[in-house]
Amino acid sequence: MTICNIFIDFGGVIVRTEDKGPRTRQAERLGLTCRELEKIIFESETSLRASTGDIPEEAHWQAVAEALRLPRPKADKVTAEFFAGDRADQSLLGYLRGLRPGCKVGLISNAWSGLRAWINRQGFADAFDHMVISAEVGVMKPDPRIYRLALEELAASPGESVFIDDVLTNVEAARAAGMAGIHFTQPEAAQEELKQLLNNHR
């Protein structure tokens, strides 16, 4: 069967923390380890609620400011510095653009409400035919509903689709939904695996 639909994750795949320096230095100034700071930002109750659209992203950052005992203006600087080492993989984005129109490309991301606007500001929304963002649809990976929704939005059958994610649990959930899956651990290797999959399923 032909693979003609590529679904891909955002954080850790398209955008990755290539320079841990800013985050590490920031955590040290706050009296935390980098892991402790990441848990406050990504694994707190408000992060989860923001990821399902229960609260807006701004409310989550207010909770982060309170957890760090910072006034909101300083918390805004924390946000900017925390993500200062993140980079969008322009090579991967270029490759995805080059697959269209022969293939459809969809984003499936567990993310807060500001992601779509951020992607638009960064200028790479054109790499995707459709974006499914958990805060907008109220469901997160690895819940099978988010994969079904993404497939429906692109009128794609599972057997003609592949999903790429750096979290193995999410890849396994996509496979359980009938899609092919690629576990992203290294950009060049993942891109080569995708190329081979597409070549073998023409």
Image (cartoon, helix red, strand yellow):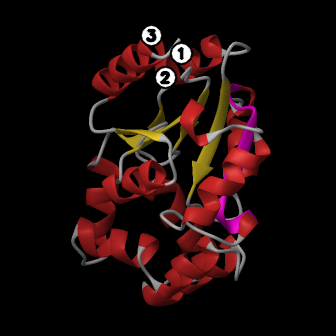
Residue 128 in magenta stretch: yes
Alpha carbons under labels 3 and 2: distance apart: 17 Å
Q: In the rendered structure, which amino acid carries the disc numbered 3? A: Asn
* Residue 28 horizontal side relative to residue 181, left or right: left
- Magenta residues, start to end: 127-136
What residue sits 62% from the left and 60% below the top?
A: 146
Q: Are discs 3 and 2 less than 8 Å apart at CB?
A: no
Mark 3 closeness class: few <14, some 14–19, many ≥20 residues within 10 Å: few
* Secondary structure under the numbered disc 2 in the rendered image: helix
Residue 60 in magenta stretch: no
Alpha carbons under labels 2 and 1: distance apart: 5 Å
Location of the N terminus by quadrant is top right
- What residue did someone put label 2 on? 92
Per the rendering, the mark at residue 95 is 1
Lower position in the chain sequence, tag 1 or tag 3: 1
**Which x, y percent locates residue 12?**
40, 46
Q: In the rendered structure, which amino acid carries the disc numbered 1? A: Tyr
**Which x, y percent locates residue 20?**
28, 48
What residue sits 29% from the left and 68% below the top?
A: 27
Please state which of residues 2 and 150 is positioned toward the viewer in this rendering.
2
- What residue did someone put label 3 on? 199
